Image: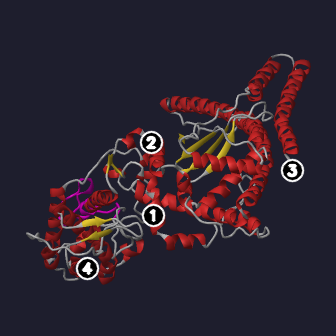
Amino acid sequence: MGPTPRAARALVLLAGFYLLGLFLLAALAAADWAAAVHTPGPFALKVFIVSAVLALPIVRGMFMLRTPPYEDVSGVRVDESREPRLWQTVRDIAQQVGTRAPDEILLTGDVNAAVSEDSRLLGLAGGTRRLRIGLPLMTGLSESGLRAVLAHEMGHYGNADTRLAAISERGRVHVLRTVAHFEERAGAKVSKERARQEKKAAAAVAKGRKAKEVDTTGTGVTYRAMARLYTAYGKFYLRATLSGSRRAEFAADVAAARIAGRDATSSALREIPVIDAAHDFYLNCYATLGVDAGLLPPPGEFLGGFRHLLAARHAELDALRGELPTEPVSPYDSHPPIAERVARIEALPDDGRASDPVRPSLSLLADADRSFAAVEETVLTPAALGLRRLDWPELVHAAMSVQTERSAQRFGALALGTAGGEDTSPHGTHGGGGTPGHGADADGTPGHGADARPGADADADRTSRPEAGPEGDGAGAATLGALLDAIDAGALWRIAERLPRSAEAAAAHGRAAREFARPQLRAGLSQLVSAEYLRQGRARWQLSWAESAALELPYGHADELPAALEAAVADRPDTGPLRALLEPVAAPETSTPAQAPAPSPTA
């Protein structure tokens, strides 16, 4: 469907919103006329009031013509003098597509590329064009892949998708705004009625009578009925306009294949979900690893460090590339599934451009490091920008040390019954809470795995936490000593009773109960031991971009520690080997890093 038919359809759908409003206003006017003619008096007055109240949201939705202004996306605008190669590439692709090049290019911090246009007169006249390119996307794509992405975006300009989006967006805004008005009024009426009934019920109770149950079932039903009418039209409107959006994506893919080549376009479509997943992993497990400790990587490395992960994890990324993501299909999707888009592109005839030279797309930037640092300034919050910066090896050691100390303290509080102020003796009991995992002997490994997420709640949380550091050095050593003393005193299995247990473990007795508890005790004890090694300065967390961080212990200890932990939680516990390992020496030997049983940073 060409631009003219699509514009006509968009205008008809937008007109339908206004026709629905006029129809409802006419129905309300007819109700007023009938009430005035056939039931004059108080009932007619009530009908007039209800009609006026219902008409107000309709009129507001119809005549509030302003749509939300252009949202300023965090990023750095680059002109042609600063990034000549990037601008020249974009202009060349726009010329090949047969459309006007964008007026602005913004480098952003997300895995995405997008175009927009400040069109006028409901999209009938063009306006300022903007192209947004995410640096993480450029990090993962080759130059030919980026050219395919840019050709896809220029295809949207060539097909007038950005101009026609103004009409569709106006209709969506008006429908949603009108529904929101009705729902807001219905909610206000329900709240008012609930407050009235609760006040009446309180008065009845005060007089010694039984209060009626609060019931607002029928309150606001007229508003909700009107909202349902607009919601039904809104669903129809969205299905119709978004189906056009999906067709526009297919058309833009074809433009990309024509300009950049079939294979380059298919490869880029396959690569984008992989880059997106890898970037989420990087943000959660590397870039924000030190936020809880008040730390961030060096300037430019918050975004630029993604390069290190992509270079080190070829096998994992290849496994992701092997399968396209399976996505549930919805009529309200703005984009078709990636698998369907790839299948359509790969079904095109071979254009003989499979052997284009592969260069990293970051080579199009004059200074990639400077760009990473500049965009980082716009992506991070002011609080995050004020955090202390450390090089990656120091950051990993400091952040993991904080997490290890905190995990050890949580386990120690549970084991000794000090969580929540309980009895500190080994004979007390305690239930509830969570127990940290343990690297080699339990469920997780420390460092950069899926569980190593100090800032996983939200982007805002990951960039606004206060500075913190390892706590309670002396208290941690005392906790470990007290736990070992309690084990020597025969309290090991009473300690196990304080730890959280599954229903099956709680129902077990005797040897079965001990077998359920033993891995958890060993894991928690390992947390305390690892924290003690770090406090003594005899261990260090080692950065790895290819796998989880590893805790480097003194020479030989990585081999001896598992047996010492087993002895401490055996049926006849012996803490001697563990105490011997923890005894500080004047000049501890070190060797090449050895991965020891290490605590998971999360509960």
Helix or strand or loop: what does disc 1 sit on? helix
Q: Does residue 285 appear anywhere in the picture? A: yes
In 3D space, how far apart are the residues under numbered discs 1 and 2 (Cα atoms)? 22 Å
Residue linked to disc 2: 377
Q: Which residues are magenta?
A: 409-435
Residue 388 forms part of the magenta stretch: no
- List x then y, in percent, for residue 133: 59, 49
Helix or strand or loop: what does disc 4 sit on? helix
In 3D space, how far apart are the residues under numbered discs 4 and 3 (Cα atoms)? 68 Å
In 3D space, how far apart are the residues under numbered discs 2 and 3 (Cα atoms)? 43 Å
Mark carried by residue 1: 3
User: Which of labels 2 and 3 is toward the front?
Assistant: 2
Which residue is drawn at the image coordinates 74% and 35% (left, top)?
170
Label 3 sits on what residue type?
Met
- List x then y, in percent, for residue 26: 87, 27
- List x then y, in percent, for residue 162: 73, 42
**Contact, CB < 8 Å: mark 4 with mark 3?**
no
- The majority secondary structure of the magenta stretch comes to loop
